[in-house]
Image (spheres, rainbow, N blue to C red):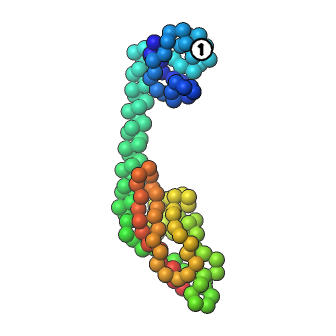
Amino acid sequence: MNVILKQDVKGLGKKGELVKTSDGYARNFLFPRGLAMEANKQAMSELKNRQEAESYRIATETAKAKEAAAQLEGKTLKMTANAGQNGRLFGSVTAKEIAELLVKEFGVSVDKRKVSVEDIKNFGTYPVEVKLYNGVTAKLYVMVGE
């Protein structure tokens, strides 16, 4: 019997998948517990519509991320920081500060956890990699000066 899973079932599949099970397992275990529903025409069309909507959402988010990556690629952000002797900063420039600067300069909202940067503790120019979406990254530079 073909069933569509309503929840993840260990050893069988993930939510929303179409799986083939024995009739007894489906009728006696999956259906009474609300873990699955029978794969009739209506359920199959709903599953197809859900999958199409998900693929459309992923495509639009990927397109937005690629557009933002093209806007950011190779750009240089200029930051000012207080420093002591020999250009050594008081503290360091963090990913949070870089993410805030990206919103201010380019209007691109990025989570601070998606900004990968080495420790910036001196004046200079440093490479930064920003993960915008799954598989979409942008490389830019941060110039720290007075």
Which percent across, then down, holds residue 21?
A: 48, 16
Instruction: Give the structural element (helix, strand or loop) at label 1.
Output: helix
Residue visible at 43% across and 30% down in the picture: 50
Residue furthest bottom in the image: 85
* 62 and 119: which is toward the camera: 119
Q: Where 50 sits versus 59, above or below?
A: above
Q: Residues within 10 Å of mark 1 (few under 14, many from 20)?
A: few
- Name the quadrant containing residue 25: top right
Residue visible at 39% across and 22% down in the picture: 45
Q: Is residue 7 visible in the rendered structure shown here?
A: no
* Left or right of residue 74, residue 8 in this image: right
Q: How many marks?
A: 1
- Name the quadrant containing residue 71: bottom left
Residue visible at 59% across and 84% down in the picture: 88
Q: What type is the residue that disc 1 sits on?
A: Phe
Q: Quadrant of the C terminus?
A: bottom right
Which percent across, then down, holds residue 36?
A: 53, 19
* 91 and 22: which is toward the camera: 22
* 33 and 19: which is toward the camera: 19
Q: Quadrant of the N terminus?
A: top left
* Left or right of residue 62, residue 24 in this image: right
Residue visible at 41% across and 65% down in the picture: 139
* 92 and 9: which is toward the camera: 9
| Mark 1, residue position | 29
Q: Is residue 17 visible in the rendered structure shown here?
A: yes
Which percent across, then down, holds residue 142?
A: 47, 74
Q: Where 62 sits versus 105, above or below?
A: above
